[in-house]
């Protein structure tokens, strides 16, 4: 993890198998295209991006992520036709350059989804496809407790991006229609992850939603995590195994 970069590829990939299923389901919504130009926005460590490139038989694939740590790890998957770059996916602009735009568990980190999706839609060629997946579990005790404790530990805690940025499924459906997509599929899906214990929920969110607290907490971060773990186990019970129900919104849309 680099200074000022809270993302840790090793921590994130502790639950790689469980995190990968929504991506597999999302990619399964794409329709075949001959040698498409592909961009993966929020590519993380690039492992899934490389697999996406192979599955789609892409002529070229670009992965974009704002985390230097993730892009550093992704460089191991770079080839002549797969490239990675550091960038803000919320400001991504590439008019008419791509046949497929994919964003898996990344859009929630940026605000103003109508404006962002309008830019992503402009990046598509005629007949281009957009496939996006975002978490929709801001009401889970793990998320609610994180926000509650952060308010106790920090004078100005960063908000929960899922709670603040993610829209309702029906809002995305209307938005896709307004952006000119003539075909779409939008769904809310629950993924039930069987974790070894309740404590593994803490390890899960340490790799995602809790990352927003590492910089403002500084040296107090380990103590915050210990406090969070104690409180969360008190809420959920110390169970083994633990069924972690995780809501996500998946959508696919195609331009005329």
Image: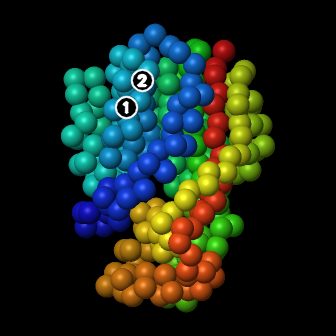
| Number of numbered discs visible in the structure rendering | 2
What residue is disc 2 on? 55
- Residue in view at x 77 percent, y 37 percent: 174
Question: Which residue is at the front of the view, 57 or 95?
Answer: 57
* Image location of residue 188, percent across then percent down: 71, 46
Residue at horizontal 52 percent and vertical 78 percent from the top: 157
**Does residue 165 appear left or right of residue 91 in this picture?**
right
Report whether residue 158 is seen.
Answer: no
User: Which secondary structure, mark 1?
Assistant: helix
Q: Which residue is mark 1?
A: 51
Vertical order, 117 against 198 (above or below): above
Residue 229 seen by the camera:
yes
Answer above or below: position of 192 versus 243.
above
Q: Residue furthest front?
A: 240
- Taking the spot 61% from the left edge, 55% from the top edge, the residue there is 192
Q: Position of residue 83 (x, y in %)?
A: 28, 32
x and y, in percent, of residue 43 in the image: 39, 42
- The quarter of the picture where the N terminus appears is bottom left
Callout 2: helix, strand or loop? helix
* Residue 49 at x, y percent in the picture: 38, 35
Instruction: Measure the alpha-carbon separation of dots 2 and 1.
Output: 6 Å
Q: Is 128 above or below relative to 14?
A: above
Residue drawn at the location 57% of the way across and 68% of the way down: 242
Q: Quadrant of residue 30?
A: top right
Do residues under tags 2 and 1 come within 8 Å of each other at their CB atoms? Answer: yes
> Mark 2: few, some, or many residues within 10 Å (few <14, many ≥20)?
few
């Amino acid at each position: 993890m680099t200074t000022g970069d809270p993302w840790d590829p090793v921590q994130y990939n502790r639950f790689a198998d469980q995190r990968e299923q929504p991506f597999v389901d999302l990619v399964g919504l794409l329709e075949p295209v001959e040698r498409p130009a592909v961009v993966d926005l929020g590519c993380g460590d690039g492992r899934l991006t490389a697999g996406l490139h192979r599955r789609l038989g892409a002529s070229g694939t670009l992965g974009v992520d704002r985390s230097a740590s993730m892009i550093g790890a992704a460089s191991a998957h770079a080839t002549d036709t797969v490239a990675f770059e550091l960038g803000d996916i919320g400001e991504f602009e590439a008019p008419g350059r791509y046949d497929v735009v994919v964003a898996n568990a990344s859009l929630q980190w940026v605000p103003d989804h109508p404006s962002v999706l309008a830019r992503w839609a402009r990046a598509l060629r005629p007949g281009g496809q957009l496939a996006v997946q975002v978490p929709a579990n801001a009401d889970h005790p793990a998320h609610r407790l994180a926000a509650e404790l952060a308010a106790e530990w920090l004078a100005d805690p960063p908000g929960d991006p899922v709670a603040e940025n993610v829209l309702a499924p029906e809002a995305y459906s209307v938005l896709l229609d307004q952006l000119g997509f003539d075909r779409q599929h939008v769904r809310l899906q629950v993924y039930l992850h069987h974790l070894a214990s309740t404590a593994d929920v803490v390890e899960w969110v340490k790799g995602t939603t809790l990352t927003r607290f590492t910089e403002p907490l500084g040296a107090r971060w380990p103590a915050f995590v210990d406090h969070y773990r104690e409180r969360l186990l008190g809420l959920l019970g110390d169970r083994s195994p633990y069924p972690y129900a995780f809501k996500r919104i998946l959508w696919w849309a195609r331009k005329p």
